[in-house]
Image (cartoon, rainbow, N blue to C red):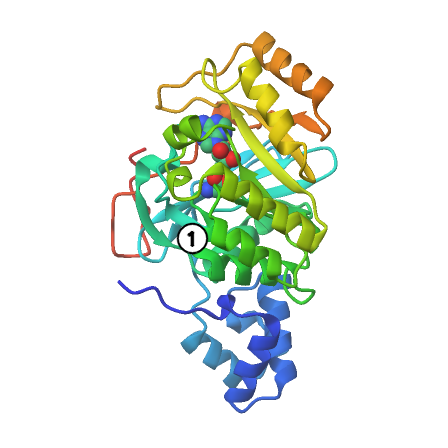
Amino acid sequence: MTIKHSLKDLLPEEMETWAQSKGYPSYKGRQMAQWIFQKGEDNPDFMHTLPKTFRELIHAEGNLHLTRLIGDGPNDFSRAFKFLFKLSDGKAVESVYIPSKKRRTVCVSSQVGCPLNCTFCQTARMGFQRNLTPGEIVDQVLHIRHLIPETMTNVVFMGMGEPFLNFDAVIQAARILNHESGLNIGARHITVSTAGIVPQILAFAELPYQFKLAVSLNAIRDDLRQTLMPINRQYPLSALLEAVKFYTRKTHRRVTFEYVMMRNVNISQRDADELVARLGELDCKLNLIPFNMTEAPYERPAEEEIQFFTDYLQQRASFPVMIRWSDGADKQAACGQLYTQIKQKETYDGYPEKIS
Ligand code: SAH
């Protein structure tokens, strides 16, 4: 089944061009953008500021029903919640809503599954199924915003998949999320996280947008990193850190390194010393994430080990070091725990049987 284009793949100005190409004034395209992205309206019949003939065109060509929520939304908006969305070809992705004191963040998926095979990550078990379209990425945020009566302040591309292996769609989605006639989320509140695809880090640095970059580091020696993250064979640490340096110099923006703490794997004193030395020359901060349970044979360190590693780094590092307790661990909704398999059904209607 080929994935159809959707009007939700378009920026508001591209919607203006689309309207013009159909013989309508461009401002009708802008109004359509506001209906779709700001009011979250999927049914053209309700877009009452648009002429009937134009609404019929949207019906015929718009393809606005891209994702469908499986199951219920949350009752308690003060806690993290994992959403499962079924796509029009029967595949499914997960997204997470993460509230905190100051922000409400949506963690979006950029691919169905992931090709990178990181040994500790649950999503890797799904294998790679396909890239998401820009509209399918934006739709995750639209749905969650509709279900939760709070303003979404931040978006992180830290769900399923490797965003930089779906670069164009991810950047297009981020631009729509940021656009003032789109979802109007500040560019500095949109973060793209990569396992370290060097050419795309360089390309990201050259873009004229203020989106932020996070890099999943997880080890600071090549031998260890390539056992955890096979992509490190293609882009070893020296190349990765050079690319990050290029990004920070070019954009004057600080990069965030994510580091999943695994017992007896990557939290020795030597690891800490090497982090201090090698990251010291970069404009960065380091987020330490205690490992969340997956089926992979790794363990979360004990509280004292987490604290010791963190304190040791904080006392020596020239950059900020923080522990990120990723919420949602009890619901398999935390970092690295996103995994879903839906029994394939070609029809979009009818609820699928979830097998994991
Ligand atoms: N492929 C991108 C986007 C996914 S982000 C990337 O790697 O950055 C998912 C984050 O969760 C990554 O930082 C990853 O290292 C982390 N992660 C994966 N499995 C985890 C686990 N079991 N516990 C905690 N964090 C995990």
Say left or right for 194 vs 314: left
Residue 316 visible in the current orientation: yes
**Looking at the picture, how far across and down is residue 163, in whole percent?**
47, 50
Say left or right for 259 vs 307: left
Name the residue carrying label 1.
Answer: 165
Q: Residue furthest bottom?
A: 23
**Looking at the picture, how far across and down is residue 245, in whole percent?**
62, 45
**Looking at the picture, how far across and down is residue 243, in whole percent?**
56, 48
Near mark 1 (Cα within 10 A), the count class, few <14, some 14-19 or many ≥20, is some
* Rendered view: 34 above or below 124: below
Cβ at disc 1 under 8 Å from ligand 1: no
Q: Secondary structure at mark 1?
A: helix
* Rendered view: 158 above or below 262: below
> As rendered, which of 105 and 86 lies closer to the eye?
105
Q: In which quarter of the view is residue 340 placed?
A: top left
x 58%, y 73%: residue: 47
- Split into 4 quadrants, where in the image is the N terminus? bottom left
x 59%, y 20%: residue: 272
Say left or right for 97 vs 132: right
Kind of residue at badge 1: Leu
Q: In which quarter of the view is residue 214 placed?
A: top right
Say left or right for 47 vs 265: right
Residue 159 visible in the current orientation: no
x 49%, y 49%: residue: 198
> As rendered, which of 350 and 30 lies closer to the eye?
30
* Rendered view: 67 above or below 352: below
**Looking at the picture, how far across and down is residue 203, in whole percent?**
54, 58
- Split into 4 quadrants, where in the image is the C terminus? top left
> Could you tell me how many numbered marks the image carries?
1
x 56%, y 76%: residue: 14
